[in-house]
Image (cartoon, coloured by chain):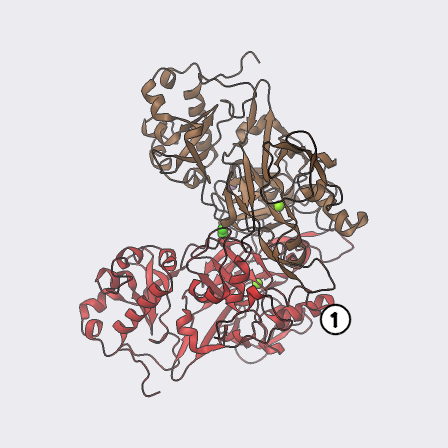
Chain colours: A red, B brown
Amino acid sequence: MANILKSFISYPETHEFPIQNLPFGIFSTKNDAAPRAGTRIGDFVVDIKAVAQAGLFDGPLLGGKAKEVFSKPTLNDFMALGRPSWREARAKLQSLLSDSNPTLRDSAQLRSAIFVGTSDAIMHLPCDIPDYTDFYAGRNHATNVGIMFRGKDNALQPNWLHLPVGYHGRSSSVVPSGTPITRPCGQRRPDATKPPVFGPSVRLDIELEMGFFVGPGSEMGSRIDINHADEHIFGVCLLNDWSARDIQNWEYVPLGPFLAKNFGTTISPWIVSLDALSEFAVEVPAQDPEVLPYLKDISGTSGTYDIKLEVDLKPAGSSKFSTVSKGSAKYLYWSFRQMLAHHSVGGCPMRPGDLLGSGTISGETSDSCGSFLEMCWNATKPLEIPSDDGSGVIKRTFLEDGDEVNLRGYCQGQGYRIGFGDCKGVILPAKP
Amino acid sequence: MANILKSFISYPETHEFPIQNLPFGIFSTKNDAAPRAGTRIGDFVVDIKAVAQAGLFDGPLLGGKAKEVFSKPTLNDFMALGRPSWREARAKLQSLLSDSNPTLRDSAQLRSAIFVGTSDAIMHLPCDIPDYTDFYAGRNHATNVGIMFRGKDNALQPNWLHLPVGYHGRSSSVVPSGTPITRPCGQRRPDATKPPVFGPSVRLDIELEMGFFVGPGSEMGSRIDINHADEHIFGVCLLNDWSARDIQNWEYVPLGPFLAKNFGTTISPWIVSLDALSEFAVEVPAQDPEVLPYLKDISGTSGTYDIKLEVDLKPAGSSKFSTVSKGSAKYLYWSFRQMLAHHSVGGCPMRPGDLLGSGTISGETSDSCGSFLEMCWNATKPLEIPSDDGSGVIKRTFLEDGDEVNLRGYCQGQGYRIGFGDCKGVILPAKP
Ligand SMILES: [Ca+2]
Ligand SMILES: [Ca+2]
Ligand SMILES: [Mg+2]
Ligand SMILES: [Mg+2]
Ligand code: NI
């Protein structure tokens, strides 16, 4: 811990955005409404466009490009450049922010051009998302849902252990943290002996997921090799795949979920690089049956990450968030690499900025589940949250109007944490 | 037929692109590689950017905007303007191309700036497609597939008559007519007692569909009313949803088709407006059970179109296309309006350029089916196509490498036809 890299910006040891993190995002300010690239350190957003305009990106890959690529309102062009460029940018920012580099440290003028207080920064989506895909790669989640709806003996579908099951999502529905979510209306069929009814979902749920963004893509008809997949992964965020269970249950046969998902998907605003996460990599669970060769990761490094995750709920009328679940991204059965290799193996074109969700991540106990469906076991075991004044409890099985959910995640290093920021949304009543 | 609108450009009565059509598309030429807006009449592409630059769009809506909106490499901005602007543009083009208007007719200079021979035009996708959704709105198709895989008594799933079933597709995989399609690799499980195998699909199929493009979109949390839906539909194209049946069969439970679809989806290059199609509107089939109110079309006009459709196949090694199926878009059970109203009813944001596919359109007989799966009844009844020299037959159940498929569609008016152009693709062998 003695030699840990330090910044001239100070922040506590438990801060999510130390100099070891340096995620990428897109922000704007009141004074300059043009969305632009930024990174985050402590309670500051670092204006990367301003860093570029000051001529500080002088490396071999970005020297000639930084001004253009970082003046864009999205990160797509930067994502397309590839991992060597991402590394060059992050290394340069790390150097500029370190306590041993006088460039910013000793220049009030540069600091005032480059540092923005987080309370002045408005966070946007990090990129245009050409396509969004959601997987179903958490074994505990798939098993829990399977037990609830098909019984213990048929919990996992026959294909589940052979491939990372996934479906195409709706990119237009992806929003940054803080965007309110309107309760969706749709068809549901509460009584199977009667026709379906139309109205607001009464089983509104969350899905605690990780998302990752594609950097360089692939041409139609070609594929991304699993052992090269990390070079195509720009970074990772938190993702809440809001889900209307009652709508899903009626609509999903045989083509999968549709209106149950496409009313909103929230992501945390900062994209954390695989380089920042690398020391938290862990082995994926043993895969038995053995996977087909195109899914076999022979790179020798581990494919998933021990990111501590939690679900925080602020019930309507309450003034504070309570943690209702604590888990970890290590419970994913399929790695991001496997998801990307599978997605592209048939020739599907991938593009810079594509977002892939992991699927719900649940641990092994009811207090580590990634959905209310599982935490409350299909509404049979309500959550009990102490009321503000401690005089009673607030019960929940699914979300009510006014409830606010935040997903949190961090990796615990030696003397620092790597986090993601909020992944928050409040439920607005359905529109009639 | 006496008073039919005529152009100074001549073409036969059976031509797909008379002055009554005037679809929109994006093209470029060798001499000017910048993609730009065009329409089509007879064997000419009309350069709409050049029309705008000549100052010929002088109407109240487009007068101040045409130069900018038609200089874009996609139609998205034009799509976003809304139906009154689309109508103004089409009416102006119709006037400029009519035999009674001297503006172009008598100006060799303007004609040479504006007319491009179709053999010199390279067609592109008409727009960036923010999101692509595919429905399953053909009752005969859903019934045929249901009978094959679940038996006659359970052919239609319980939800099918209550809502237009759909799933999110992959917008990156949508390509213009003429783009070759590489046979996808993936997992399939030919023997249910053994593990799945990996390799090229051996059941490569087509889906004969119509596609339609969204114009003005909708905000997250709001919806598009069915009685207003036509104002949000920019126009219609042919769509081939290439499908790998063996991959689909193994992967699709429970989240729907994924790699079975995302290797390629072909569309015809010209977007035909609802105004050009309006006189071919027909009633949707009687919907029983009665649909929920949000799907009830009380506009008083008909919601689907009698577009004659055909599937043409040029088997590998053969020199000519043979028509293997003839149907009509009138067999759709759900209208485009119903699809759009359903898609947005839960608050899913729609954006200009979104593409919605109808689902496979099959008629009532085996020679009017929209997929080889149905035409050949799950590979039990091979198609027999006369060989070039007439000495034998070529048999097909699914597509082989080198096979080329073209979808064709037209409406037959009084003295003219409204068509769509080719929707063509040739199958390349899988990449190892
Ligand atoms: Ca897309
Ligand atoms: Ca999309
Ligand atoms: Mg999910
Ligand atoms: Mg289809
Ligand atoms: Ni409207």
| Frontmost residue, A209 versus B111 | B111
**Whether residue B353 can be seen here:** yes
Check the residue under mark 1 and report the chain it is in.
A
Q: Residue at x 44, y 56 (%)?
A: A217
| Frontmost residue, A395 versus A366 | A366
Question: In what quadrant of the picture does the N terminus of chain A appear?
Answer: bottom left
> Residue pushed farthest right?
B153
The residue wearing badge 1 is A153
Q: Is residue B129 left or right of residue A290?
A: left
Q: Residue at x 64, y 34 (%)?
A: B329
Q: Is mark 1 within 8 Å of ligand 3?
A: no
| Frontmost residue, A418 versus A193 | A418
Q: What secondary structure is found at the residue carrying circle 1?
A: helix
Image quadrant assignment for residue B117 = top left
Q: Position of residue B160 (x, y in %)?
A: 70, 48
Q: Is residue A298 left or right of residue A274?
A: right
